[in-house]
Image: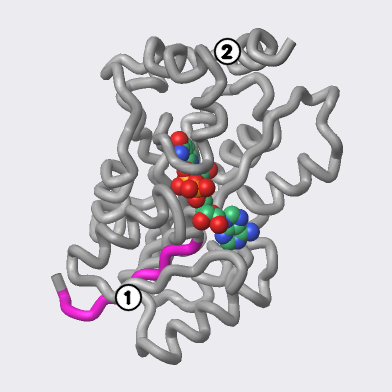
Amino acid sequence: MEQGRVAVVVGGASGIGAAIATAFESDGWRVVVADLPATDVTDEDSVAAMLDGVVASHGRLDVVVNSAGVSTLGNVVDLAVDEWRRVVDVCLTGAFIVTKQAGLRLSAGGAIISLSSLNARQPGAGLAPYCASKAGLSMLTQVAALELAPRGIRVNAIAPGLVVTPLTQPAMDIPGIEDDYLENTPLGRSGRPDEIASAALYLATAEWVTGEVLDINGGAHLMRYPDLHKHVLAAFS
Ligand SMILES: NC(=O)c1ccc[n+]([C@@H]2O[C@H](COP(=O)([O-])OP(=O)(O)OC[C@H]3O[C@@H](n4cnc5c(N)ncnc54)[C@H](O)[C@@H]3O)[C@@H](O)[C@H]2O)c1
């Protein structure tokens, strides 16, 4: 690999993003981790200033990964609009802001990689804003790939199935949910953050791949999404 390439991992302080930062570092990249509170994906000025800072201090920008994400649990009829907006703001509008600001600064050979989800294609009861955001993010990835291809910038996403991280641990603590996931995962186990990181490294250097949303989920997209609602009701009613 060419020496000194620079990757920014937004949302890189935890979980999958942290594993991606480690994988890029191990592969010889210079890595900048951007996360709350210094960088907020819902604040365009904050993302722009962070990326300007990276270019100023490292002299180049090759790959921007966006792993920032939040979720919430609640049925559509019970969900406060503010809670809907909180999730969509980070998971979809935040992804748009990172894609836009990265697209303004990357040059030919550059790549943008977002974290979508199995929920972009499989609905989960109780996860409306998250599912809707990730479905939107998968389409945003394809549109941005078309628009940025003439400039030689590739735009891809990874759609993981269950990976136990601080984001998903609270759901795993509800009896029945993890078993239901695993029963609906042909390969019979959850994923590890480093397995998602390997895919990010692949997409960073796959020079003929753009507009791809890569399912990495042990085959879970071939089956059904767990019935979260049933398990939540059983645990709390
Ligand atoms: N863990 C899974 O099973 C799974 C499955 C599918 C998709 N994903 C997606 O992968 C990504 C990473 O998830 P994770 O499991 O590592 O979660 P995580 O909670 O461990 O990490 C998410 C990171 O995003 C950061 N973040 C949240 N809001 C932000 C904001 N406004 N600005 C900047 N950073 C912000 C957090 O501080 C945190 O460091 C998310 O986009 C998530 O939706 C995760």
For residue 35, above or below residue 30: above
Identify the residue shown where x is 33% and y is 44%.
193
Residue 138 vs residue 88: left or right? left
Identify the residue shown where x is 38% and y is 21%.
220
Residue 24 vs residue 42: left or right? left
The kind of secondary structure element at disc 2 is loop
Q: Quadrant of the N terminus?
A: bottom left
Q: Tell me the mark number nearer the camera, choosing from 2 and 1.
A: 2
| Residue topped by disc 2 | 227
Amino acid at dot 1: Val
For residue 220, above or below residue 10: above
Q: Quadrant of residue 181?
A: top left
- In three-dimensional space, the C-alpha distance between marks 2 and 1, rounded to whole angstroms, equals 41 Å
Kindly tell me whether residue 145 is visible in this rendering: no
Q: Which mark is residue 98?
A: none
Residue 205 image offset from top left, x and y in percent: 24, 60
The kind of secondary structure element at disc 1 is strand
Identify the residue shown where x is 40% and y is 35%.
163
